[in-house]
Amino acid sequence: MNTPEWGLILAYWLHMLATVVWLGSLAALALLVLPSARRALDDLAYANLLETLQRRLDPVAWLCLAVLVATGMFQMSANPNYTGLLAIDNYWAAAILVKHLVIGGMVAASAYQTWGILPELRRIALRQARGLETPELVRLHKREASLLTANLILAGIVLALTAVARSVS
């Protein structure tokens, strides 16, 4: 069965749009928003900002991920280099496999940050507001920054692997 051209065009467009939104928001947070907020805000205000950002960005990020999975599978099935699930018999298939493994790492890091680090930072801010000691705050800020940096690096790798796969097509 031939894939309709309009369907492939729509899948490419939605895939690129989801990529730009997800990686753009990740880059904006890592490079602009959070470093500036850490310097300008006290810990409670910073925690409140994180909570507000998380409430706004989480649905967008997870929607982008769903769009990327759906459109990526559609594009992959339409590519003449695709010969079957886990059939790694050409450079395109190898690049796509590694790309998906790297994306899995990005999703895992994002999930840990969303449901692990950010809630803990909010709990610490509440303890600080009550005047309690919070020696783990510096460690969590470093872990948060490391995860954001790692995700940006992984995003660059994903884009490079996409370029490799496109050059083979």
Image (cartoon, grey):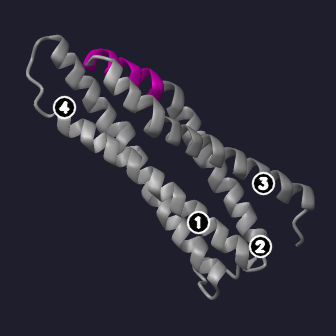
| Structural distance between the alpha carbons of marks 4 and 1 | 35 Å
Q: Amino acid at mark 1?
A: Ala
With 139 as the anchor, is 4 left or right in this view?
A: right
| Stretch in magenta | 43-54
In this figure, which residue is indicated by the disc labeled 3? 11
- Disc with the residue nearer the chain's start (3 vs 2): 3
Q: Is residue 117 above or below residue 133?
A: below
| Structural distance between the alpha carbons of marks 4 and 3 | 43 Å
- Residue shown at 72% from the left, 75% from the top: 167
- Residue shown at 55% from the left, 37% from the top: 25
Foreground mark, 1 or 2, reads 1
The circle drawn on residue 137 is 4
- Magenta segment's dominant SS is helix
Of residue 164 and residue 59, the one placed in the foreground of this image is: 164
| Structural distance between the alpha carbons of marks 3 and 2 | 12 Å
- Disc with the residue nearer the chain's start (1 vs 3): 3
